[in-house]
Image (spheres, rainbow, N blue to C red):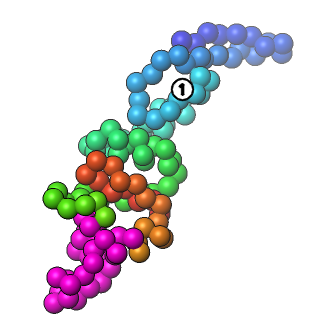
Amino acid sequence: MGSEFVDEFGYSYGEYFITDYDVLFSVGEYDFPQSLAERYDSLEEYMSYPDEVIRVIAENQGESPIIYELYAGVTDEERLGYILVEEGLIIVPEHLRSYIDYEAIRRYHALNTGREFVDRYFVEFL
């Protein structure tokens, strides 16, 4: 809720104090409403993902996320290894794919990126 005040030079200004909110990112008591709206708009393209994924993206504001949906039935590390090979980020000849340690591929990839496992998604930041 805003109120209009006048400073010692006669200019009017508004003060805002935020006590409650329902968004997927942290809000400070004195955050400017327009900057909050801009931050919300920057997350709009990710609103089809679960809330946990959006929170991770919001925490890493300013970085470009790549979101991978993981397969069911194997460990998170192994799922990511499969995705990295299928997307062509790690090149493995087709005839050798059944011999690959996909968890090791994930560990190798994780050393070079900012990353987070969230639910059935893997979010990495470039």
**Magenta span covers which residues?**
78-107
Residue type at mark 1: give it.
Answer: Pro
**Taking 83 as reference, is 23 left or right?**
right
Crowdedness near tag 1: few (<14), some (14–19) or many (≥20) residues, C-alpha within 10 Å: few
Nearer-the-camera pick, 10 or 125: 125
Measuring from the top left, give residue 18's x and y in whole percent.
Answer: 55, 18
Q: How many marks?
A: 1
Q: Is residue 35 magenta?
A: no
Q: Residue at x 33, y 49 (%)?
A: 118
Place residue 69 in its image quadrant. Answer: bottom left
**Taking 35 as reference, is 89 left or right?**
left
Q: Residue at x 69, y 17 (%)?
A: 13
Q: Is residue 90 magenta?
A: yes
With respect to residue 21, does 55 lie above or below?
Answer: below
Q: Residue at x 70, y 10 (%)?
A: 5
Place residue 58 in its image quadrant. Answer: top left
Q: Is residue 45 visible to the viewer in this orientation of the structure?
A: no
With respect to residue 49, does 94 lie above or below?
Answer: below
Nearer-the-camera pick, 112 or 77: 77
In the picture of the structure, the residue carrying the numbered disc 1 is: 33
With respect to residue 81, does 115 lie above or below?
Answer: above
Measuring from the top left, give residue 66's x and y in whole percent.
Answer: 37, 59
Q: Is residue 39 visible to the viewer in this orientation of the structure?
A: yes
**Taking 88 as reference, is 31 left or right?**
right
Measuring from the top left, give residue 40's x and y in whole percent.
Answer: 43, 36
Decide whether the magenta segment is chiefly helix, strand or loop. helix
Q: Secondary structure at mark 1?
A: helix
Q: Residue at x 54, y 12 (%)?
A: 1
Measuring from the top left, give residue 119's x and y in whole percent.
Answer: 28, 47
